[in-house]
Amino acid sequence: MTENTLPHDHGTIKDMDEFNRLLSSTKGFDNVSRALAQMADGTRMRIFWLLCHYEGCVINISAIMGMSSPAVSHHLRSLKQSGLIESRREGKEVYYKAVDSTEVRYLHHMIEDLMEITCPKA
């Protein structure tokens, strides 16, 4: 365990090497940052939250959101590229839903906890 001195004395970090090791691996921080960046847009967050509870096509999502299909498609593309939602094709129709992952569950619960809302009854 090393005790390094920092430029400003605001207390000491007992194991600077451990902090350096944890902070040097940026992949995890970058992944979390990308997911949170998606939630920085209120409309995208609402679509994401909807897709945590519902699998739907662009037309139905547009109707629920009160938005145009092209606008919804734009947000869906961004959410899909970030790995938060997935799609499946059934004939000519494409259905979207939230990915079943730990990251998605954390974001889903974070939204509900911060907004003090709960999942709608099925």
Image (cartoon, rainbow, N blue to C red):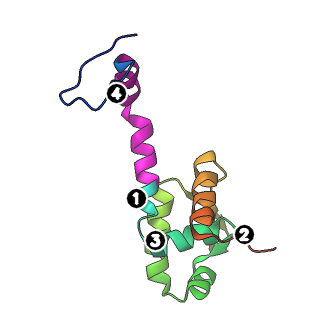
Marks 2/3: CA–CA distance: 22 Å
- Please tell me which of labels 4 and 2 falls first in the chain: 4
Q: Secondary structure at mark 4?
A: helix
**Position in image of residue 93 (x %, y %):** 64, 74
- Please tell me which of labels 2 and 3 falls first in the chain: 3
- Please tell me which of labels 3 and 4 falls first in the chain: 4
Q: Is residue 87 visible?
A: no
Of residues 88 and 103, the one drawn nearer to the viewer in this rendering: 103
Marks 1/2: CA–CA distance: 23 Å
Marks 1/4: CA–CA distance: 21 Å
Q: Which mark is residue 37?
A: 1
Closest to the camera, between mark 3 and mark 4, is 4
Does 51 sit above or below residue 70? above
Marks 3/4: CA–CA distance: 32 Å
Which residue matches tag 2? Answer: 119
Residue located at (46% from left, 63% from top): 39
Q: Which mark is residue 24?
A: 4
Of residues 8 and 50, the one drawn nearer to the viewer in this rendering: 8
Q: Are marks 2 and 3 in contact (CB under 8 Å)?
A: no
Residue located at (57% from left, 78% from top): 58
Q: Quadrant of residue 62?
A: bottom right
Sort mark 3 into few (<14), some (14-19) or many (20+) by Cα contacts within 10 Å.
some
Q: Which mark is residue 75?
A: 3
Q: Identify the magenta region.
A: 17-35
Sort mark 1 into few (<14), some (14-19) or many (20+) by Cα contacts within 10 Å.
few
Please name the amino acid that badge 2 sits on: Cys
Marks 4/2: CA–CA distance: 37 Å
